[in-house]
């Protein structure tokens, strides 16, 4: 189950990831994503949907609202990160595809040396 401390840790990572994405710091973004993935895996570890639903229903309204708000903020940060990362990833894919095509032409026709 997602707890408030885990959500806070995830939010800290996602805030840092958004900053890295804004700065085009892809290495830092990748490292932070690995940390966030580990936190998500920890939250999922031993998760039971029925038990989690019961636990969420037993939460006081203010805690449930805080979790909901935190999750909404996390999703907004994820969307912002994607607005920065998706164009970069598309350009990398294009660059890699061009290199692949060039190698295929070289393999098919040989190096055009004088």
Image: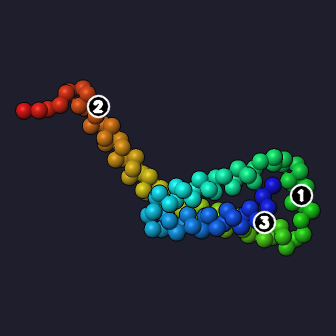
Disc 1 marks which residue? 55
Q: Earlier in the sequence, mark 2 or mark 1?
A: 1
Question: Which percent across, then down, holds residue 22?
Answer: 48, 68
Q: Which mark is residue 40?
A: none
Q: In the image, residue 18 lies at what x, y percent? A: 54, 66
Provide the residue designation for mark 2: 104
Assess whether mark 1 and mark 3 are in contact (beta carbons under 8 angstroms).
no
Q: Earlier in the sequence, mark 3 or mark 1?
A: 3
Q: Quadrant of residue 17?
A: bottom right
> Helix, strand or loop at disc 3?
helix
Q: Nearer the viewer, residue 111 or 62?
A: 111
- The residue indicated by pointer 3 is 4
Choose mark 2 or mark 3, whichever is in front: 3
Could you give the CA–CA distance between mark 2 and mark 1, rounded to whole angstroms? 57 Å
Residue 113 picture location, percent across and down: 11, 32
- The N terminus is located in which quarter? bottom right
**Quadrant in which residue 39 is drawn:** bottom right
State the residue at coordinates (73%, 69%): 69
């Amino acid at each position: 189950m997602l707890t408030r401390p885990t959500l806070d840790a995830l939010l800290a990572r996602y805030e840092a990831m958004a900053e890295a994405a804004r700065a085009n710091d892809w290495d830092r973004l990748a490292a932070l994503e690995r940390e966030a993935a580990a936190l998500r895996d920890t939250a999922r570890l031993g998760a039971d949907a029925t038990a989690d639903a019961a636990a969420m229903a037993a939460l006081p309204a203010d805690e449930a609202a805080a979790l909901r708000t935190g999750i909404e903020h996390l999703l907004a940060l994820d969307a912002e990160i994607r607005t920065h990362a998706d164009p970069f990833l598309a350009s990398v894919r294009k660059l890699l595809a061009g290199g692949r095509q060039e190698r295929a032409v070289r393999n098919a026709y040989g190096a055009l040396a004088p």
